[in-house]
Amino acid sequence: MREDSRKHKKALDAFGKGKIKKARKILLELREAMQDDRLKVDVDLALVSCLNQVDDHGLLLEVTAEGMALAQKLILPDAEAVFCGRKAVTLLQKQSSIIHRMKCIKLPPEWFEFATERERDEYQKLKEGLKKIGLEADSLLNRARALASKDPAMQFQLLFEEAQVRNQMLDAFFFIHQRPSKLGFKWRLWTMNREHRLELARRLDEIRSLYLLAAQKLNETGDETGFAYCYFNLALAYRGLWKYRIADSYLRKAEEVATRHKLRQILCGIAEVRKDLSQSNISGEDAGYKDFLVGL
């Protein structure tokens, strides 16, 4: 037990220094070997911060499901709320794969029927799966709100997760309503109709408000590091919608706070995003895409 606690602390120290792979390795080994349910909750809480939404999609769903069950068993409402929020974010990662597949088999405007019954059935299954994921994510968020205490750190976590969930939904909305256009893609221009542009702007403003409110909650305790994480994620949100100038302004804000508090993980992330923003041509060739349709 004491050795497990020591390893857990070692992993947290490594994470704090930006050594994510080292922390991940220690926590995964701990999770497989330990028997203490209470410490396993703490290990799972630390582990979800080390896992990548894309590369570790399946593992994240497994860890959050386990964490929710253990937290409920041990009556740890704040921990359960965190797992609920993270599972909602992870589930919504499936949206992009579902929508892409639906677009691949969608009927041309002049057709009245699907080419085959198999395609018709697959399209309907995907449509139902998309709806189910959205409903489950909303349900998880509602449960997280009901469970979470008023502790500022907990409220920060909850609002941060909700902002990420809304951002996932926004990405799907953008993908659905952005009209195919070579010129639009080349110059990164929105080619959707006015109604959808206004809705997209409204949703983006909601996400920005959630991130800033989250950072302000944590700042109530004298901890301003939340601004670094929220500014960085806002930069990612604007970059995903081709708003590179605004994205860069949030990166500068995130860098200022991260530098002041020596947040290496954020600083490394900023460096990677800046490389992406500096590319004038993005062809999409040789890119590796993850398929999240397993389990639908």
Image (cartoon, rainbow, N blue to C red):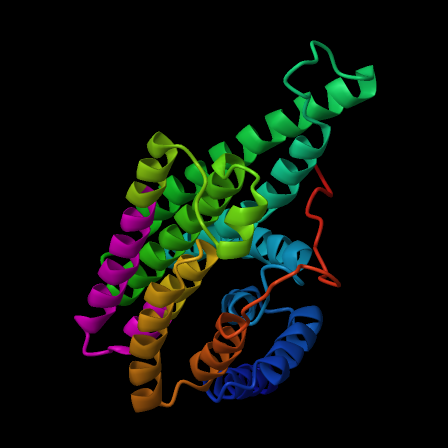
Residue drawn at the location 24% of the way across and 78% of the way down: 223
Query: Is residue 277 shown left or right of residue 296?
Result: left
The quarter holding residue 266 reads bottom left
Image height of 118 relative to 285, above or below = above
Query: Is residue 7 shown left or right of residue 277?
Result: right
Query: Is residue 191 shown left or right of residue 78?
Result: right
Q: Which of the image's four quarters has the N terminus?
A: bottom right
Counting from the top left corner in percent of width and height, residue 141 is at 40, 44
Image height of 74 relative to 222, above or below = above
Counting from the top left corner in percent of width and height, residue 225 is at 30, 78
Residue drawn at the location 37% of the way across and 51% of the way down: 162
Dominant SS type (magenta): helix
Which residue appears farthest toward the top when viewing the image? 112
User: Is 218 in the magenta?
Assistant: yes
The quarter holding residue 213 reads bottom left
Residue drawn at the location 71% of the way across and 62% of the way down: 287
Q: Is residue 55 visible?
A: yes
Boundaries of the magenta span:
203-231
The quarter holding residue 100 reads top right
Query: Is residue 23 shown left or right of residue 80?
Result: right
Image height of 84 relative to 234, above or below = above
